[in-house]
Amino acid sequence: MPVRTLMLAAMLALATPAHAGDKESPADLDSVLEQMMTPQAWLGGRVTEADVELLFAYLRASLIASTYGQEVPVPEELKRRAEALGRELRAHGVLTGLLLLQALEARAKQALPPPRSDYPPSGRI
């Protein structure tokens, strides 16, 4: 199993029990989702100054080359960093999506009418 998959599984295992055992409050889930969806949560600690420099160096070289009708190949380091960032952002997106579903489930359950106590439980499935 790849390391990234293990990291994602660990993140999910840590995130889910925080709300699974008790009746989750949609307001609590909303605040967690709000934090997860900020640009800082998505990019903070993932994109470094070196990444930005690498990208803009490539863009400058491409712009200059294009004035002469030429193309500049994408540097391997830029490709590698883009792929790594893609994997990390995908994992963050999965976690955010699962939290969103959890919040939606809590809201849907909250919207249900209370169970009626004057009827016995149904024997039918």
Image: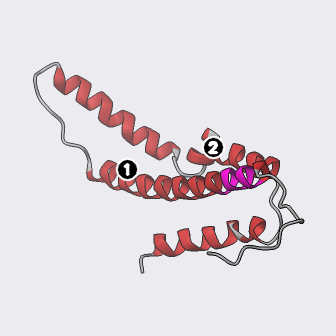
In the rendered view, how is the structure colored?
Answer: secondary structure
The residue under the point 76% across, 65% down is 19
Q: For the C terminus, which image quadrant?
A: bottom right
Residue marked by disc 2: 37
Relative side of 44 to 24, left or right: left
What's the magenta region? 102-109
The residue closer to the viewer here, 101 or 114, is 114
Count neighbours of disc 1 (C-alpha within 10 A) and say few if under 14, some if 14 to 19, many if 20 or more.
some
Query: What amino acid is found at the position of numbered circle 2 in the picture?
Result: Met
Residue marked by disc 1: 82
Circle 1 SS class: helix
- What secondary structure predominates along the stretch shown in magenta? helix
Magenta stretch holds residue 119: no
Relative side of 86 to 74, left or right: right
The residue closer to the viewer here, 67 or 108, is 108
Circle 2 SS class: loop
Query: What amino acid is found at the position of numbered circle 1 in the picture?
Result: Ala
Percent position (x, y) of residue 96? 60, 53
